[in-house]
Image (tube, grey):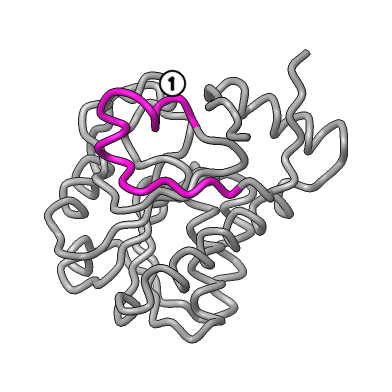
Amino acid sequence: MEKTPITAEQMRHYDSYTINTIGIPSLVLMERAALAVRDEILHAFPLYLDRVVVVAGSGNNGGDGLDVARLLHIAGVNVTILNVGNPEHASDEHQVQDKICRYYKIPETTDLGILKRATLIVDAMFGIGIDRPVTGAYADAIEAINNSKALVVAVDMPSGINTDTGAVMGTAVKADATVTFAFNKVGLTKGDGVKHAGRIIIADDMGTYAVDD
């Protein structure tokens, strides 16, 4: 039986309960999320792996993206990380993943020009937390992604799509596929979210514990 799509607040609550009450570390959930994205990319898009670019924001969605970059690198894929946003605002999990990627010597850049040659782009800028219009460097990155000829896989949500309404928050990534974590999100089932998500894959074996209290 398909589960009812959830809101951003529900997902935050489930994650918090899983991490803080049950005791599953956030980095474990992040690894499970990244494994789901890696598996989808390797199994569904094997012909697009020549030049993969992971576009990573500075929050936990970007941390997921860095984790995906490492897993693809280990699998032998040619992958480059495109960092967007302010690294000084990086979340703790993001900093951990960035340190690991540096040990693996995965190339990193801030040059949007790399997207022109990409065969597959992983969109890992914004997850469920976006609550204001996208501006600045992030808006520029979204425009560059949408203007590229690459296949696009979004991590959890297409960046710029509101998790609860499906509205475009100023601008938003148009993905070919979206791997969303634990449960489908309301915003992927209504409004512009449907058109921007592409094919939706629900990674429902994350271990996230659903509790409504």
**Quick one: which residue is furthest to the bottom in this view?**
76
Mark 1 residue type: Asp
Q: What residue do we see at 72% from left, 46% from top?
A: 26
Residue 56 lies, in percent from the top left, at 41, 54
Placement of 74 over or under 140, stated as above or below: below
Which residues fall within the magenta stretch? 185-203
Q: Magenta stretch: residue 193 in it? A: yes
Check disc 1 and report its element: helix, strand or loop: loop
Residue 87 placement, left or right of 113: right
Q: What residue do we see at 78% from left, 29% from top?
A: 17
Residue 7 placement, left or right of 172: right
Placement of 54 over or under 209, stated as above or below: below
Residue 198 placement, left or right of 69: left
Q: Quadrant of the C terminus?
A: top right
Q: In front: 7, or 204? A: 204
Q: Quadrant of the N terminus?
A: top right
Residue 25 lies, in percent from the top left, at 79, 48
Placement of 212 over or under 198, stated as above or below: above
Residue with the mark numbered 1: 164
Q: What residue do we see at 28% from left, 23% from top?
A: 191
**Quick one: which residue is furthest to the top in this view?**
213
The mark total stands at 1
Q: Magenta stretch: residue 142 in it? A: no
Asked if one can make out residue 102 in the rendered structure from this viewpoint, the answer is: yes
**Quick one: which residue is furthest to the left in this view?**
147
Asked if one can make out residue 88 in the rendered structure from this viewpoint, the answer is: no
Q: What residue do we see at 48% from left, 44% from top?
A: 156
Residue 105 lies, in percent from the top left, at 50, 81
Residue 63 lies, in percent from the top left, at 54, 53
Label 1: how many Cα within 10 Å (few below 14, some 14–19, many 20+): many
**Quick one: which residue is furthest to the right in this view?**
22
